[in-house]
Amino acid sequence: MIEGILTGLYTAFTPINLAMVLLGCFAGTFIGMLPGLGPVSAIALMIPITYGFDPASGLILMAGVYYGAVFGGSTSAILINAPGVSGAVATAFDGYPMAQKGQAGKALAIAAYSSFFGGTVGAILLFVFVPFLAQISLSFQSADYFALMLFGCTAIAAFSGEGQVLKAMMMTVLGLMLATVGEDSSGVQRFTFGLPDLYDGISFLLLSMATFALAEALIVVLRGNSDKLHAEAEELDANKLGSMKLNKEEVKDMAPVAGRSSVLGFFVGILPGAGATIASFLSYGMERNLAPEEKKKEFGHGSHRGLSAPETANNAASTGSFVPLLTLGIPGSATTAVMLGALLSYGVQPGPRLYIDYPDVFWAVIISMYLGNIILLVLNLPLIPYFSKLLDIPKTLLTPIILFFSLIGVYLVSFNTVDLTMMVIFGVIAVMFRILDFPLAPLLLGFILGGMLEENLRRALLIWDGSWAFLWERGLTASIMAITIFTLLIPMVSTIKKWHMQRSRG
Amino acid sequence: MKSIFDNRARVGSLLLILFSLFYLRYIYDIPVDTQFGETTISARTLPMGLAVLMIIFSLVQFFVGEDGPAISDSVKGYHWRTTISLCLLMLVYSLAFSFLGFVLSTLTFLLVGFYILGERRWKLSISVAFGLTLFMWAVLTQLLDLYLDSGEIMRYFVGESS
C-alpha cells in the first residue's frame, strides 16, 4: 500500500498532472457557475479533450473539473440565486439572503472554507476506506457483481424524489435498453438495422453530451431563464462583494457544523444514487434541528450554519461518491457514471483490480482530489470577484457557444457527422423527457451499467452451469439481492399507500 | 375538462410503451446464439426482459402514477420557436458539416445561433464567431494536429490538400 501511495504521489505531483488539477479546477468553476451546466456536463465536455491523455492525467483533470463545478455551482447560487448544480440548491437558502444583505464575500468565504473542510474530511475517509473496501471486494465474483449492478440501478431510483421512483426506474430500464444496441459480447448484432454506425453501439459520450450538456442548454433557452439571470448578474455589480474575512466567533460557531456535516455527507455520498444533493439537504435539515432556538430562526435568512452545512456535506459527498466507483466499479451518481465511461474508454476497468493493476491511477486520483480542494481555496477564492464577471457574458452568445462545444466534442472523438445528427436527436428526446419530468441521470447510469450487467450475468450463468440458483444459493449475492429488493420495495410501498389514500379520499 | 393525456407522467408512459413495442418487435430479428444452450441466456434474453419490465412499469405509471401539473400548464411561456430553431440549426450543422467543412459550417452555425437568440449587435456577433472559429481551427489543426474536414466545397475550389 505504501508503495502504491508513493507511486500515486509521484504521479500526482508531476508538472503535467499538477497543471491538470489547476486547469480542471478553473474550467470546472467556470462551467459550474453557468446556470444549467453542472458537473456532469462539465466532465462530459472534458472527455474529448482527454482522449489522448494517459488515464491518470485524464482522470485527474476530471476530478478537478468535478470539484471546480461543485464550487462554481455554489458561487452562482450565492451571487444570483441560480444554483449551477442541484447539490447547491440548499446553499442558496442562506447564501443568497447573505448576498442580499451585502455579505456576498463572507458567504463565498464560508462556502469555500466549508467545502475545503468537507473535502479534507472526505479525502481522509476515502484514504482509509477505499483500500479496505477494495481488498474486501477482491473476493467478489461475477454473480456478486451482477447483483451489485442491479443494486446500483435500483438505488438511484430509490433515492430519487417523491413521485419519481417509478419514473427513475423506467429511465434506468430505458438506459439498459439503449445499451443493448450494437454487437453483444458473443458477437451477435442487436438493433443495428443494418447501419454500420450502430455496430459498435451508441457512443456513451454522445449520449451523455446529448442528455446533459445539450439538453441543459436547450432547457435554459426553452424556459427563458437566461434573461432573468442576466439581469440579476448585472445588478450584482452594483452591490459589491464585501469583506471575505471571518471572525473567531463565526469560525467557532461553524466548526462543529462542518464536522458533523462532513461525516454525514461522506457516508451519504457512498450510497449509490444518493449523492451531493441529498447529502446537502439532509445536513441542512439536521443542523436546523440541532441549532439552539435563536439560531434556528436565522435559517433561511442568511444563517452561517445554514450555509456551512450543505456546502460541507456536498463536497464530502462528492468525495464519497468515488468509493463505489473506485472499489466496485459501480458509479454512485451521474457524474461518476460519466467518469466510469471515460475510464472504460481509456481501457481502464474500475473496480477492486484498479487498486492492484493501476496503483498510479488509483492513488493519484485520490491525492489529486485533495490538491483540487487546496487549489479551490488558495487560488479560486481570491479570484471570485473576477469569476463573477463571467456571469455577465450575454447568454445570446454563450448558449450557441456551449452547443458548438458539445457538438464538436463528440465529432472530435469519432470524426463522424452521423454521430452529430444522432446527438441532436437524442438531445431533443432528452429535452422532451425533461419537460415530461422524467429524470435523465438514471438513464445514463442504466446505459453505462447495461453492458457490464449482461456480461457478469452471462459469466455467472456459465460458472453456475446455466442455473440461476446463484441468486439465492451464494451468500453474498443473495445478501446484495435482498438489499436491492428491500431498497426498491420501501419507496414502492409508500407510493402504493399514498395512491390508495388518495383514491379513498377522492 | 382536461384530456387524460394532458398529464406529463401519462404521456411519458405512453411514449415508453410505444418504444418498448417497437423494441420488442426487433428482438425477434436478433439471431439466437447457442453459446450457453437454449435454456439459459441468449442475445435475446436481456432485451426481452427489459422490454417486458418497461411495459409493466409504464402501465403502472400510466394508471397509478400521481397526477402532476397538466402539460398545458407546465409549458406555458416556453420559448418554443427559439428552441426549435436552435434544434433545426444543430441538425443542419450536422448535415452540412461534410459539405461546408469545419470553418464555414461553424461560422454559419454561430452567427445564425446568435441571431436566433436575439443578438443584434452585428460587430460583436461577427467578431466572436470569427474569433472562436479561427481559434478552434488553429488549436485543433495546428497545435493538436487533428484532422478537420475542410468540406467538399473547399476541396472543389481549392483542391484536396486543404
Image: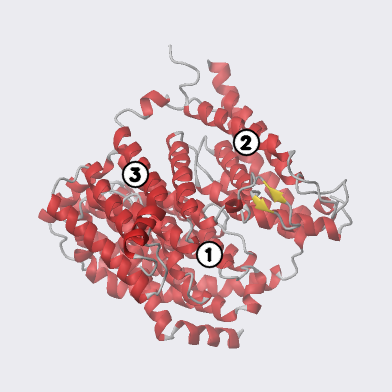
Mark 1 or mark 2, earlier in chain? 1
State the image coordinates of residue B141 (x, y, percent, origin top left): 36, 71
Q: Quadrant of the N terminus of chain A?
A: bottom right
Above or below, comparing residue A112 to residue A470 in the picture: below
Q: Circle 3 is placed at which residue position?
A: B89
Q: Residue at x 45, y 76 (%)?
A: A368
Taking the view exactly as shown, the residue that stands out farthest to the top is B1
Give amino acid for label 3: Leu
Q: Which mark is residue A342?
A: 1
Q: Chain of mark 2?
A: A
**At numbered mark 3, what does the secondary structure look like: helix, strand or loop?**
helix
Cα–Cα gap, marks 1 and 2: 33 Å
On whether disc 3 and disc 1 are found on a single subunit, the reply is no
Give amino acid for label 1: Ala
Give amino acid for label 2: Met
Residue toward you, B106 or B150: B150
State the image coordinates of residue A438 (x, y, percent, origin top left): 49, 38
Q: Circle 2 is placed at which residue position?
A: A492
